[in-house]
Amino acid sequence: MENKTLLTYTKPERNAYLVSMVGQNMIYNIVGTALAYYFQFVILIPAMAVGVIMTIARVWDGVNDFFMGTIVDKTRSKWGKCRPFLIYVPIPIMIITLLCFLNFGFYGESAAKNVLIVGWASVMYILWGMIYTIGDIPLWGVTALMTESSHDRNKLLSFARIAGGVGGGIVMLSIIPISLALGNSLTDTFGTSASNGERWGFFIGALIFAVIGTALFQICGFKIKERVKSGEKRPSLKENFVTIKNNKPFMQILLSGILGSPKMLIMLAAMPLINYYFATKDPVMSLVYMIVLGGGVFIGQFAGMALAPFLIKKYNNKKNLYNISNLSSALPYLAIFVVYLLTPRGMLATNFALIAFFSILFMVNGFFAGIVIVLQSSMIADCIDYEEHKHGNRPDGIFFAGQTFLAKLTSGIATILAAVAYAAVGFSDAAVEDLNAYIANLGPNDMLPREMAQYDNFMMILFFLVSVPPAIGCLLSVIPTWKYALNDDVHKQILSELNERRRDKELQASLAESDESKDGID
């Protein structure tokens, strides 16, 4: 049982942190949910070009995370080492987010314009990732500095994941339906084309959510305190890479995350799946299906995140919880594709029982994913304690840079996998333009795209991407962590010894100050 005198955060600090996590994840999901859709299905950049842009940007951004992590670990200020970034970075992130949705028309109009469109998309997305990183790493890294209590830290990380899920979920469920509705309104009001109205609808949608998200994100830097003191050592980037390489449990977590990259495809393909198969780009139906299907994911995910601290405390075995949760997700993922194959031409979109079953499958996947998400953050925080105990250095910045690196690299890998899949069935640029035009001109007696043989491959690939590769990713994830190198009992002993060391240092510092005061009096 942990000593009750351990320094920890207050409730107002916890709440301020969680509000900021809501805002930050709103901003993240503007780009994470809507930008790839906007590039490929709104301004019609070819699927492979989108894949290459986003993969290169993600890989570079992932590498850049380690530079930023090193900067955080070197930072010493009157606010601490994470708070300065949390105070100053949210507004620049908002500006770059909006610039991502300002482009120069539609791909295919002319060769010169195509170069400009792709070039702008590439530069803005890469720049967004770099600026976002400057706020992201400190926001996660500060959790290891707000408390000396392992239990309080696990609770904070669990709540943080839930808060992030709420913020991200709000945007994920609503930004595309809202943007489509705004596009329709602009088309009706100003008599512009449906495609141009949709393009500006996405910009206005991004603007609305970016302003709200930034206002919430800004709160954290002014309201929290860093209580765990960092050592005087300020490691170089090279030293940090050596630290990562030599920290076996942290390397196992990184490898597990990379092998699990295909799991990210469910987020990338969910939007086009709902809008082309289920809702046929109708804003109201898009929102309904997002709530029914996407809501299942988030309900399950929140339940898993909320339950994770209890499971960690009860079973005292993070490794087994992590591996079992990953393995348990594989079967529901595969079941999604099996259900589609049984009813490929639309019954799935109209049969209430099948929709309910589909929602349950997504909910089960979300539940286990929620447990894994919390465990990953908690295990990374444990690795920081392990490193401090072993070498006297707390690599909060560089290790949580590893977490953000994983999020970006896995997203990049998933994006290129999706691009290859779309290109393989021809679901790209001109074909998307033709399908969009067909949907825009649908009459009351016309067949829906999901009912037409010519679009079978397009619909099939969307279902494939949200099911089969994620199932494979779940199975691959457990390979590096099957024999995880840091068990919970050892970590508890490490944390107890670290807190004793900190108390001894504080006592010695206090005695030294007392001696100096006496010398001054004498």
Image (cartoon, grey):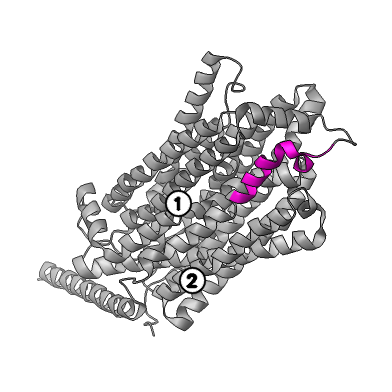
x%, y% of residue 264?
52, 52
290 falls in the magenta region: no
Q: Is residue 115 left or right of residue 356?
A: left
Q: Are marks 1 and 2 in contact (CB under 8 Å)?
A: no
What is the secondary structure assignment of the residue under circle 2? helix
x%, y% of residue 51?
50, 37
Pick whichever, 442 or 132, lies toward us: 442
- Res. 505 in view: yes
Q: Amino acid at mark 2?
A: Lys
Which residue is under mark 2?
155
At a point 70% along the width and 60% down the height, the residue shown is 358
- Res. 15 in view: no
Vertical comparison of 370 with 48: above or below: below
Single out the residue that lies furthest toward the bottom: 1
3D distance between C-alphas at marks 1 and 2: 21 Å
Vertical comparison of 152 with 414: above or below: below
Looking at the rendering, the stretch of residues picked out in magenta corresponds to 447-464
x%, y% of residue 233?
19, 57
Circle nearer the viewer, 1 or 2:
1
On residue 245, the disc is: none
Q: Main secondary structure of the magenta part?
A: helix
On residue 407, the disc is: 1
At a point 52% along the width and 14% down the height, the residue shown is 112
Q: Amino acid at mark 1?
A: Ala
Quadrant location, the N terminus: bottom left
The answer to which image quadrant residue 329 occupies is bottom right
What is the secondary structure assignment of the residue under circle 1? helix
Q: Is residue 505 left or right of residue 192?
A: left
449 falls in the magenta region: yes
Single out the residue that lies furthest toward the right: 445
The answer to which image quadrant residue 248 occupies is bottom left
